[in-house]
Image (cartoon, rainbow, N blue to C red):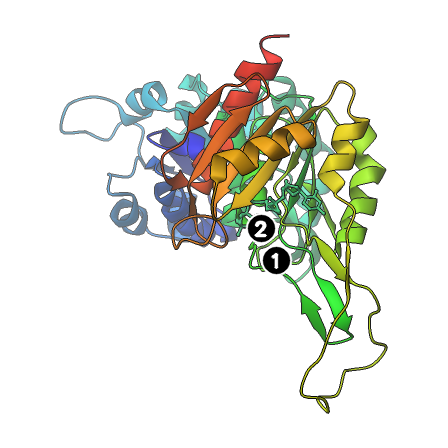
Amino acid sequence: MYHLKNKTIILGVSGGIACYKSVELVRLLQKAGASVYVVMTQNATRFVGPLTFEAISGHPVCLELFAPTPDTTFHHIQWAEMADAVLVAPTTANVLAKVAHGIADDALTTFLLAVQSPILLSPSMNTRMWENKAVQENVSILENRNISILQPASGELACGTTGAGRQPDAAIIVEYLHRLLSPQDYYGKKILVTAGPTIEYIDPVRFISNPSSGKMGYAIARAFYSRGANVTLITGPTHIEFPFDIRTISVQTANEMADAVFEHESQMDIIIKAAAVADYHVTQKAAHKIKKDTDELHIALKKNQDILKELGRRKKHQILVGFAAETQELKNNALQKLSAKNLDMIVANIVGQKDSGFQADTNHVMFFFKDGKEESIPLMSKESIAHLLLDRIQSNFLRAV
Ligand code: PMT
């Protein structure tokens, strides 16, 4: 959550059953590096006490319009000035209507009138209320005013019915808020990212693979998404959840990855190949589980198509970025791949260490560019590397055009 670091987020909480979920929201925002201040409506306090938000946020909760403060300021005005972004979750139909029509009759709605930073509303209510024409017209009014509305999730509701109206998971709300605060320098760009390992079956129950977790590729896909791009992620099998709101295509073998990549490649502006693709597949996959009745077993392997090399051959105006996972001769091997595969840039990745490469949350890489420039990147989180990579693509290939 790169662009939430050191940001001040004001969380508005209005009176709905989803109030309890907003406690987790405070935690997630803080984990992302943001400071959180909470404004509640009186009705919200019937679901969760202000003390809970006060204890978790570490700041007094703003509840009353004219409550005395130690420094004689009005929280609802002072906080509006210091907010980098405002999130209201849950947003009730009542608060939605008041904001749409400029009504300011309590601390939250008055505060919202004074805010000039981006606002994200997360409505949650009964399905029939959500579908009501008045509510939908209010949503349109707010969207036309550039206030972002997060569509409620569908599922079982507290009132016993099923349909649209649930407050989305806290992680999804935070992802959305992060996009709102990120520069939209990739807006409209079509991006293809590959991630994770591929697996090559020996028999129906055994395969050859590698330890790629998908973390690096997913971080790149999410960084592009947060910066406004239209992202397609092609992923081998991983244990991470598919990223929210990103078209994700799941494959297993190198062959399947090749088919998926070549199906989408021509529509893309930028392609990033972070996947650890198997170089070989088993020539003849056994139809049944192989029995262990010989002391030695020889498995014949055949080379897979090099997907990246083929992309380099087809490339006309796209930006093509490869990865090179190396345990030795990092620079030489990476430069050889940069040129042999006709890439614009390669991320040379030191693998086989605890804090870098496969599975780690951090990574140690070097960037090499086709014009001979190079940059050594200190050890940092995969998320930070992903954003740095996007910054360098901007400055080297996009801003220059
Ligand atoms: O997933 P994580 O656990 O986060 O780990 C991240 C990572 C180590 C997998 C990642 O940072 C990384 O280095 N990915 C590339 C791994 C790799 O396959 O490197 P390579 O040097 O073998 O291949 C070079 C490039 O050719 C890669 O972009 C690869 O996607 C591509 N390739 C390779 C073989 C093949 N048949 N087709 C390809 O397109």
Q: Amino acid at mark 2?
A: Gly
**Residue 121 visible somewhere in the drawing:** no
Residue for point 24% across, 43% down: 58
Of 126 and 354, nearer the camera is 354
* Picture coordinates of residue 319, whole percent (x, y): 68, 23
Extreme residue toward the top, this view: 401
Extreme residue toward the left, this view: 70
Disc 2 residue crowd, few under 14, some 14–19, many 20+, Cα 10 Å:
many
Q: Is residue 64 left or right of 356 when viewed as pictured?
A: left
Q: Secondary structure at mark 2?
A: loop
Of 368 and 158, nearer the camera is 368
Q: Is residue 132 above or below residue 169?
A: above
Q: Is residue 309 left or right of 185 when viewed as pictured?
A: right
* Picture coordinates of residue 365, whole percent (x, y): 45, 37
Residue for point 52% across, 34% down: 332
**Circle on res. 238:** 1
**Circle on res. 214:** 2
The quadrant of the picture occupied by the N terminus is top left
Residue for point 77% across, 51% down: 304
The quadrant of the picture occupied by the C terminus is top right
Determine contact: label 1, label 2, CB under 8 Å.
yes
Calculate the distance from the C-alpha at mark 1 to the C-alpha at mark 2: 6 Å
Extreme residue toward the bottom, this view: 293
* Picture coordinates of residue 348, whole percent (x, y): 51, 37
Is the distance from the Cβ of mark 1 to the nearest ligand 1 atom less than 8 Å? yes
Q: Amino acid at mark 1?
A: Thr
